[in-house]
Image: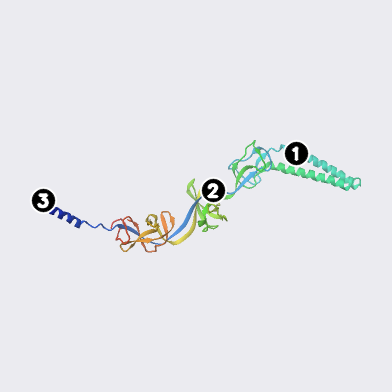
Amino acid sequence: MSWIGIGLGVVLLGCGGSEVRQRPTPPPPAVRTEMVQPQAVEIAITVVGTLEPAAKVVVAAQEDGVVTAVLVREGDRVRAGDPVVQLDDRRIRAELAEAEARRLDSRAQTHRAEALESDGLLSASEADTARASLAMAEARADVLRTRLGFTRITAPVDGVVTARRVEVGNLAAARSALLDLAAGPGLVLRVPVSELDVVHLEPGDVASVRVDALPELELSASITRVFPAAEGATRQVTVELGLPQPPPQVKPGFLARARLVLERRPDAVLIPEPVLQRGSEMVDFVWVLDGDVARVRPVEVGERLEGKVVIRKGLVTGDEVVVEGLARLHDGGPVRRLSERGRS
């Protein structure tokens, strides 16, 4: 019995050793690659701003008075000189009537004084006093006529009423805002741009603009002005874009996004963003094939463009970059390529 047990043990031990020797070697990791080919790309940024009228005009009162009529509403189009607001003018009319009476009286007194002066019955200084009184009366009447004109407020420019700030019965103080006008053709979009990007922009550059409220609409714009200084805290520079003929459904106040092209490169190297790896020392790299062997290739990363990354240094035309099967790779290890359908 003991001999059989020993024999069985030997047989079992022998079988176990056979299994170890026959375990198959795992195949090399399967990968799919793409060849590096230069591509023409646009390096662009998207910035956000609010559409504004090309020119904003505030119609203000130049005289105190109670509003007796507001002749326009938001959305009305006006031409320069059209009446828009009327203030109560009764007090000024009464003062003007009094001033006109004083002017007429001063004129009559001046005529009498000049007649007496010519007859030698009145001194020159007394005649001069009469003439000065007439001049003062005429000036007073002129001032009141001007103030009376200020009670009838007119549009200073052609435009569209965007805000009505007073109603009938309100007391309007001098220099207080009554109406806002959007003047000038088209709209403008002012957007903040980083100091690192604004150096690539200049007036005349073309941009595309999309409005959040009308996502299917793409508008053409051009840079009309680059402001001369950056904001102290943000280091951003305001860039103004002009939209000369926007469709009527695009309104001032809409949120808009402008795509500004900073640079056009005819031969950029691009890779899919998931292909980019980062090592333990925070070094960016990709896997490339050297024959059937995987190699680590450190790279210098540039801009990110819609799921792809610009590689500034590290890859050249013809390099074979691994784009699938990255998990089991190690530097110098063998690989096998997948066909287009994923089969070796």
Name which residue lies at 20% across and 56% down.
Answer: 20
Q: Label 1, label 3: how many angstroms apart (C-alpha)?
A: 136 Å
Which of marks 3 and 1 precedes in the sequence? 3
Task: List x then y, in percent, for residue 99.
Answer: 78, 40
Nearer the observer, 95 or 1: 1
Q: Is residue 206 above or below residue 170?
A: below
Tag 3's secondary structure?
helix
**Most extreme residue toward the left, as rendered?**
1
Q: Is residue 226 above or below residue 173?
A: below
Nearer the observer, 30 or 259: 30
According to the picture, the residue beneath numbered tag 1 turns out to be 95
Say which amino acid is labelled 1. Glu
Closer to us: mark 2 or mark 3?
3
Say which amino acid is labelled 3. Gly
Tag 2's secondary structure?
strand
Task: List x then y, in percent, for residue 217.
Answer: 48, 49
Q: Quadrant of residue 138?
A: top right
Say the numbered circle drawn on residue 51. 2
Name which residue lies at 74% across and 44% down.
Answer: 143
Which of marks 3 and 2 precedes in the sequence? 3
Name which residue lies at 49% across and 56% down.
Answer: 261
By what rule are the colours in the image chosen? rainbow
Q: Which image quadrant: the C terminus? A: bottom left
Name which residue lies at 82% across and 42% down.
Answer: 106
Q: Are marks 1 and 3 in contact (CB under 8 Å)?
A: no
Nearer the observer, 281 or 260: 281
Say the numbered circle drawn on residue 23. none
Closer to us: mark 1 or mark 3?
3
Characterize the local packing of mark 2: few (<14), some (14-19) or many (20 or more) Cα atoms within 10 angstroms.
Answer: many
Say the numbered circle drawn on residue 5. 3
